Image (spheres, grey):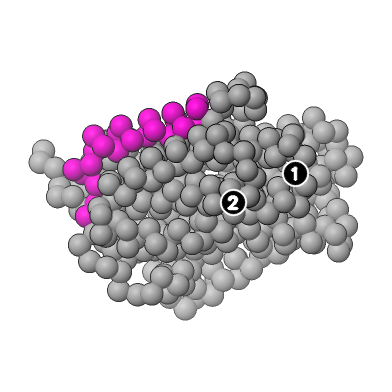
């Protein structure tokens, strides 16, 4: 069977494995780099006696870099090509990763962090665009489910690798750089299959944030709940009466839910005429799960069961939202919308911990559940309004 031209959608049932492997390699590098880098850098800064405030400011550069890099990614890919832009981003990310070891001046870690997470954001945006373009429309959910599963595994592998590699010496930095550089091989091999952006996007970047609001709002909620949950659930759990080990295990159960439900939810979305219905259903489950958290504090097992399914629904917002985006747009519009998708995720990761933390300060420990329920509730309202105004 002949291959479609670069940038064309794949035939209904054919999966382009070189493109899929290239995109998955890029996202694996992203997941491992973030999962390994965040705890590694925080621990090193702590060892150097840097204040928690400055550690927080330096960590915030990740979200700022993503929000700035995302709108610029489509223009770079249009000018230099998708695969070439991704290869440059791989090199910049790998050099930056090693830079954290060789550069001891803490102030220089701010531009270094900006470069690292900016390059990672470019890989994020373009790998999603590549996979969305070449995914067969009838199997888009399955392909994106595989993609989302690998991303979740990458995030999970990062802290695990950190536990083995530690924070001493060059080894963790060299390992992280090597993992990132390995992603260049399949990207280079599949470069002739990478999408071609012949035209610039028709709209201003921010218009794409609101063009498919059901998708971008879904990933905003995903980013907010994921980042807020990972950073504040251990505090919520211990205040609720669980031991640190029990709270950590509950967080692990939620992570397992993130991984095992991606592909089934993606396949389910392929069978639905309108993916917005599935997005609404998952947020309703997320809303109910959040409201149940205060009631379940007496039972670790019941809390674990709820968090397993809850974690699956939260991660499903990303996969199904990305699929909804791909079913609505094509070409340069899809590339720009993918950038808007990642931008919305970055905003969520910055806003989520702030909103949830503030709610816990104002209303007590249950503010964790109320804030997350509020995020899900607002999404349910938006989704129902959109479905009513714009039926499929």
CB-based contact (under 8 Å), mark 2 and mark 1: no
Residue at image x 24%, y 47%?
A: 194
334 left or right, relative to 40: left
Where 138 sits versus 67, above or below? above
What is the magenta range?
174-196
The residue identified by callout 2 is 110
> Residue 50, labelled with which disc?
1
Quadrant hosting residue 272 = bottom left
Between the residue at mark 2 and the residue at mark 1, the CA separation in whole angstroms equals 13 Å
Task: Please report the residue visible at 10 percent of the width from the left and 41 percent of the height from the top.
Answer: 2
* Residue found at x 72% / y 62%: 355
**Is 193 part of what is drawn in magenta?**
yes
| Of residues 271 and 349, the one drawn nearer to the viewer in this rendering | 349
Q: Give left or right: position of 346 versus 230.
A: left
> Which class describes the residues within 10 Å of circle 1: few (<14), some (14-19), or many (20+)?
few
Q: Is residue 392 above or below residue 169?
A: below
């Amino acid at each position: 069977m002949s291959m479609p031209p670069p940038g064309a959608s794949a035939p209904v049932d054919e999966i382009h494995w070189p493109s899929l492997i290239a995109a998955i390699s890029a996202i694996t590098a992203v997941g491992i780099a973030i999962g390994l880098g965040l705890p590694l850098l925080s621990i090193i800064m702590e060892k150097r006696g840097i204040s928690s405030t400055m550690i927080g400011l330096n960590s915030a550069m990740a979200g700022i870099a993503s929000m700035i890099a995302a709108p610029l990614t489509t223009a770079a890919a249009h000018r230099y090509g998708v695969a070439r832009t991704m290869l440059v981003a791989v090199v910049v990310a790998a050099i930056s990763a090693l830079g954290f070891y060789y550069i001891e001046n803490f102030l220089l870690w701010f531009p270094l962090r900006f470069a690292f997470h900016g390059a990672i954001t470019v890989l994020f945006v373009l790998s999603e665009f590549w996979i969305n373009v070449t995914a067969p429309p009838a199997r888009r959910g399955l392909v994106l489910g595989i993609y989302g599963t690998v991303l979740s595994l990458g995030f999970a592998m990062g802290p695990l690798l950190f536990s083995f590699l530690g924070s001493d010496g060059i080894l963790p930095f060299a390992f992280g750089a090597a993992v990132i550089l390995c992603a260049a091989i399949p990207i280079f091999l599949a470069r002739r299959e990478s999408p071609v952006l012949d035209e610039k996007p028709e709209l201003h970047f921010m218009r794409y944030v609101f063009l498919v609001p059901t998708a971008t709002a879904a990933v905003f909620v995903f980013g907010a709940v994921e980042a807020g949950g990972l950073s504040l659930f251990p505090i919520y759990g211990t205040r609720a009466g669980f031991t640190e080990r029990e709270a950590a295990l509950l967080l692990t159960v939620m992570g397992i839910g993130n991984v095992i439900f991606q592909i089934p939810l993606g396949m389910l979305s392929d069978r639905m005429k309108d993916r917005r219905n599935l997005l609404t259903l998952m947020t309703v489950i997320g809303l109910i799960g959040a409201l149940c958290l205060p009631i379940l504090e007496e039972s670790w097992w019941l809390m674990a069961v709820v968090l397993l399914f809850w974690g699956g629904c939260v991660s499903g917002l990303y996969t199904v939202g990305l699929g909804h985006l791909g079913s609505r747009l094509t070409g340069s519009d899809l590339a720009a919308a993918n950038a808007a998708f990642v931008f919305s995720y970055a905003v969520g990761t910055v806003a989520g911990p702030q909103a949830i933390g503030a709610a816990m300060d104002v209303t007590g420990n249950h503010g964790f559940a109320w804030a997350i329920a509020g995020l899900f509730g607002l999404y349910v309202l938006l989704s129902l309004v959109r479905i009513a105004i714009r039926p499929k």
